[in-house]
């Protein structure tokens, strides 16, 4: 009978220990999920900032070329031609 009681006590201790570990791991998981969400938001913000910076760089390159620099002249001409095509398409759509 005593042996059975010891086995039950041992099982109870193991169950309590497993429940505590489960609770700890659950809290850790929630913490990591929160951290992941924060990092995803930060990543999105940084990507948006990078895109905005790239657009500013392209605009500055175009402005530099328009001011007489030969360095970005080809890119600027291509961009202007693209804008002209877009304007032409808008005019065609308005004419219809």
Image (cartoon, rainbow, N blue to C red):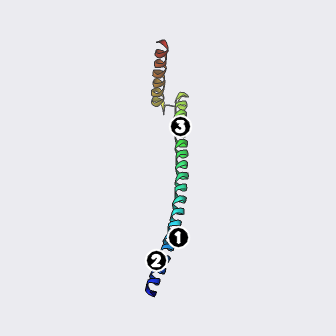
Q: CA distance from mark 3 to mark 1?
A: 55 Å
What secondary structure is found at the residue carrying circle 2? helix
- Judging depth in this view, the residue of 6 and 48 nearest the camera is 6
Residue 84: x, y in percent? 48, 21
- Judging depth in this view, the residue of 91 and 28 nearest the camera is 28
The answer to whether marks 3 and 1 mark residues whose Cβ atoms lie closer than 8 Å is no
- Judging depth in this view, the residue of 6 and 66 nearest the camera is 6
Tag 3 residue: 57
Q: Residues within 10 Å of mark 2 (few under 14, many from 20)?
A: few
Of badges 1 and 2, nearer the viewer stands 2
Q: Where is 2 relative to 40, above or below?
A: below
Residue 64: x, y in percent? 54, 32
Of badges 3 and 2, nearer the viewer stands 2
Tag 2 residue: 11
| Earlier sequence position, callout 1 versus callout 2 | 2
The answer to whether marks 1 and 2 mark residues whose Cβ atoms lie closer than 8 Å is no
| Earlier sequence position, callout 3 versus callout 2 | 2
Most distant residue in the bottom direction? 2
Q: Which mark is residue 32?
A: none
Q: Residues within 10 Å of mark 3 (few under 14, many from 20)?
A: few
Residue shown at the point (43%, 86%) measured from the top left? 3
| Earlier sequence position, callout 3 versus callout 1 | 1
Residue shown at the point (44%, 86%) measured from the top left? 1
Residue 77: x, y in percent? 46, 26
Residue 63 picture quarter: top right
Q: CA distance from mark 1 to mark 2?
A: 14 Å
Tag 1 residue: 20
What secondary structure is found at the residue carrying circle 3? helix
Of badges 3 and 1, nearer the viewer stands 1
What secondary structure is found at the residue carrying circle 1? helix
């Amino acid at each position: 009978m005593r042996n059975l009681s010891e086995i039950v006590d041992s099982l109870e201790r193991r169950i309590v220990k497993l429940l505590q570990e489960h609770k700890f791991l659950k809290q850790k998981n929630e913490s990591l999920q929160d951290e992941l969400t924060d990092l995803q938001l930060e990543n999105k913000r940084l990507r948006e900032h990078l895109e905005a910076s790239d657009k500013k760089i392209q605009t500055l390159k175009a402005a530099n070329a328009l001011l007489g620099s030969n360095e970005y002249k080809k890119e600027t001409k291509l961009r202007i031609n693209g804008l002209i095509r877009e304007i032409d398409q808008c005019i065609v759509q308005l004419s219809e």
